[in-house]
Amino acid sequence: MNPVGQDGRLTVLFENHHAELLAYCTRRIGRTDADDVVSDVFAVAWKRLDEIEWETARPWLYGIARGVLANRWRSVRRQRRLRERLSALVGGSAETPDIYVVRRDDDNEVIHALKRLTSDDQEILMLAAWEELSAPGIARALDISVSAAEKRLTRAKQRFAKVLGPTRFPKAASIPAGTEGDV
């Protein structure tokens, strides 16, 4: 069935698959957050209605839901790590203030080097490092092939290593493209 009009197609998609999608998300994240995930899924679906093959709409929606859920889980992990780092700072750690100054200088140097790259290189490096996406995840996020994602990531790492200089992080360009975290 392929109803005419954007609103009609979204309505049919929602009516046919909302309950199943809500159950799918509830089993994975709990009822409290499942409604938000399903809303995000249908927001993405509305933007991509032209891509729907109506015979496979449900698995297509599950694929979108997987991505939304993965983003939420990554966000939760990042927040947990940040809370742990902050509690270590507040709780008093064994590190001395000079170590924090050095670490901050290193962070500033890395951020400055990142800003010297093209926006495409910055995006792919941030997807790999900050969002912890592997090459297949980057490919999906950028809507490119996995091979293209691997090549772009490798080249971006090489350019980043050049900008940082040979004495800083000498192995940055040698990290294999498929070793960065979850998809």
Image (spheres, rainbow, N blue to C red):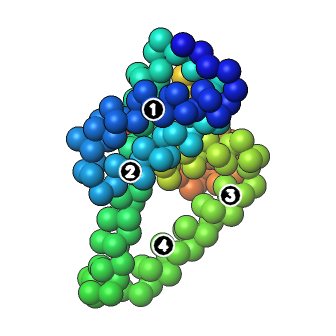
Q: Earlier in the sequence, mark 2 or mark 4?
A: 2
Alpha carbon of mark 1 to alpha carbon of mark 2: how far? Answer: 15 Å
Alpha-carbon span between mark 2 and mark 4: 41 Å
Q: Which mark is residue 15?
A: 1
Return the disc, 4 or 3, that comes first in the chain's sequence: 4
Callout 3 touching callout 2 (CB < 8 Å): no
User: Quick one: SS at disc 3?
Assistant: helix
Q: Is residue 145 above or below residue 32?
A: above
Q: Which amino acid is tagged 4?
A: Arg
Task: Estimate how packed mark 4 is, as few (under 14), some (14 to 19) or many (20 or more) residues with alpha carbons within 10 Å.
Answer: few
Q: Does residue 76 appear in the picture of this structure?
A: yes
Q: Where residue 155 appears, x then y in whole percent?
A: 65, 33
**Helix, strand or loop at disc 1?**
helix
Q: Earlier in the sequence, mark 1 or mark 4?
A: 1
Upstream in the sequence, badge 3 or badge 2?
A: 2
Residue name at image x 61 percent, y 41 percent: 124
Q: Nearer the viewer, mark 2 or mark 4?
A: 2
Q: On residue 120, which mark appears?
A: none
The amino acid pointed to by label 3 is Ala
Look at 34% across and 49% down and name the residue there.
Answer: 34
* Vertical side of 57 occupied by 34: above or below: below
The alpha-carbon separation of the residues under discs 1 and 4 comes to 53 Å
Q: Secondary structure at mark 4?
A: helix
Tag 2, which secondary structure? helix
Q: Amino acid at mark 1?
A: Glu
User: Which residue lies under the disc numbered 3?
Assistant: 113
Compare residues 162 and 57 and report the one nearer the observer.
57
53 lies above or below 92: above
Task: Quickly name the residue at label 2.
Answer: 35
Question: Could you say which disc has been placed on residue 103 in the image?
Answer: 4
